[in-house]
């Protein structure tokens, strides 16, 4: 269901307009197919399913928002929602209103050799779009972990409109998928991609970093007997934290971590958690870029805590 929080001074009006639009759609009949304008992972909606199409009948039966039959109750529910707004939303609005250059017809970035990668402009941002296990095991220093499926939801928090980008990907197909996601939200200055064989990379004396991943037993051991200057950092969204708080954790939402990391002490030890470990890995990469040296990830995170009870 669409978001209605972009214009707070018109929140009730916009929520009511959404309700009215839904009534027009519902009147089309259960057999009517729906092709959504956004996909799973987009920050323009809430808990979107990973389906390319649906139907009025399926949504009428399964969509929680369509179980609210009172217009005012629907408005109240939408007003009560709390969503984060990535900084790029303002730039997205500007591009939608004024237009921009068309995206390239072929979005597969150029393959980079290690030498070409090292000769890229110093200000270029390296995005590691591989899965989180690959990033945790070995990654290029200073790179931001941003797995392909998570680009739509999180790239807009960490990138600026004019950033030049270099991708670290497993292969050309993964690089193309990443470039397509990035172009769709306005980040199309991709200089190329590197598909490093990390053992070979290390064998040629090139630098790399890794992030320690801990399991639930080690997590509980640390929580029961905290190491010196150890902190548990929860980077889930506020609604998740409010619904299922974790004792002893400090909370900084992953999307806002570049700014809120200033409230933390870079020399201290941080174990990062989220729902599963994916957002925690992104957060760990952001902290490491800002000079935090003692950072690890609770892999499994809240899911592991629930499974362990």
Image (cartoon, rainbow, N blue to C red):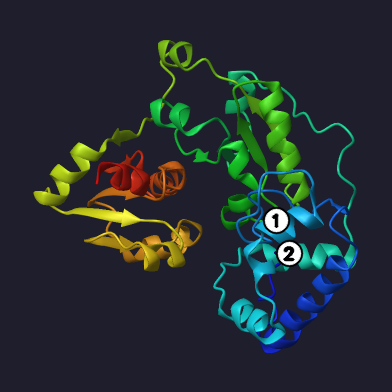
Left or right of 200? Residue 12 is right
Q: Which is in the foreground here, disc 1 or disc 2?
A: 2
Q: Position of residue 224 (x, y in %)?
A: 11, 50
Mark 1 near mark 2, Cβ–Cβ under 8 Å? yes
Q: Position of residue 199 (x, y in %)?
A: 44, 13
Q: Residues within 10 Å of mark 1 (few under 14, many from 20)?
A: some
Residue at x 72%, y 80% (from the top left corner): 15
In this figure, which residue is indicated by the disc labeled 2? Answer: 91
The image quadrant of residue 248 is bottom left
Please state, as top left, top right, bottom left or bottom right, where the N terminus lies in the image: bottom right
The image quadrant of residue 76 is bottom right
Across the whole image, how many numbered discs are drawn on residues?
A: 2
Label 1 to label 2, Cα distance in Å?
A: 7 Å
Name the mark on residue 170: none
Is 8 drawn above or below residue 244 in the view shown? below
Left or right of 135? Residue 74 is right
- Local secondary structure at mark 1: loop
Q: Residues within 10 Å of mark 2 (few under 14, many from 20)?
A: some
Residue at x 74%, y 53% (from the top left corner): 58
The image quadrant of residue 250 is bottom left
In this figure, which residue is indicated by the disc labeled 1? Answer: 161
Left or right of 297? Residue 253 is right
Q: Position of residue 91 (x, y in %)?
A: 73, 64
Residue 210 in view? yes
Q: Position of residue 142 (x, y in %)?
A: 47, 39
Front one among 302 and 197: 302
Mark found first going from the N terminus, 1 or 2: 2
- Local secondary structure at mark 2: helix
């Amino acid at each position: 269901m669409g978001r209605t929080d972009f214009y707070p001074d018109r929140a009730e009006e916009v929520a009511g307009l959404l309700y009215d639009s839904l009534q027009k759609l519902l009147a089309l009949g259960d057999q009517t197919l729906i092709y959504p304008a956004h996909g799973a992972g987009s920050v323009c909606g809430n808990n979107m399913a990973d389906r390319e199409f649906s139907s009025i009948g399926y949504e009428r039966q399964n969509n929680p928002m369509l179980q609210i039959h009172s217009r005012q109750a629907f408005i109240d529910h939408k007003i009560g929602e709390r969503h984060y707004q990535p900084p790029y939303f303002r730039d997205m609005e500007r591009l939608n209103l004024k237009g921009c250059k068309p995206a390239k017809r072929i979005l597969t970035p150029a393959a980079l050799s290690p030498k070409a990668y090292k000769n890229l402009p110093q200000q270029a941002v390296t995005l590691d779009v591989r899965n989180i296990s690959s990033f945790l095991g070995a990654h290029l220093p200073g790179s931001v972990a941003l797995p392909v499926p998570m680009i739509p939801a999180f790239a807009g928090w960490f990138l600026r409109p004019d950033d030049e980008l270099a991708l670290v990907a497993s292969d050309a197909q993964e690089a193309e998928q990443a470039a397509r996601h990035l172009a769709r939200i306005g980040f199309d200055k991709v200089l190329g991609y590197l598909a490093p064989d990390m053992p070979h990379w290390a064998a040629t004396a090139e630098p790399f970093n890794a992030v320690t991943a801990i399991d639930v037993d080690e997590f509980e051991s640390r929580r029961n007997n905290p190491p010196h200057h150890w902190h548990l950092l929860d980077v889930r969204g506020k609604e998740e934290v409010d619904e299922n708080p974790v004792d002893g954790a400090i909370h900084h939402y992953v999307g806002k971590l570049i700014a809120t990391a200033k409230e933390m002490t870079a020399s201290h030890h941080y174990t990062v958690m989220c729902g599963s470990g994916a957002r925690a890995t992104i957060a760990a990469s952001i902290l490491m870029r800002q000079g935090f040296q003692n950072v690890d990830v609770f892999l499994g995170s809240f899911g592991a805590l629930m499974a362990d009870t």
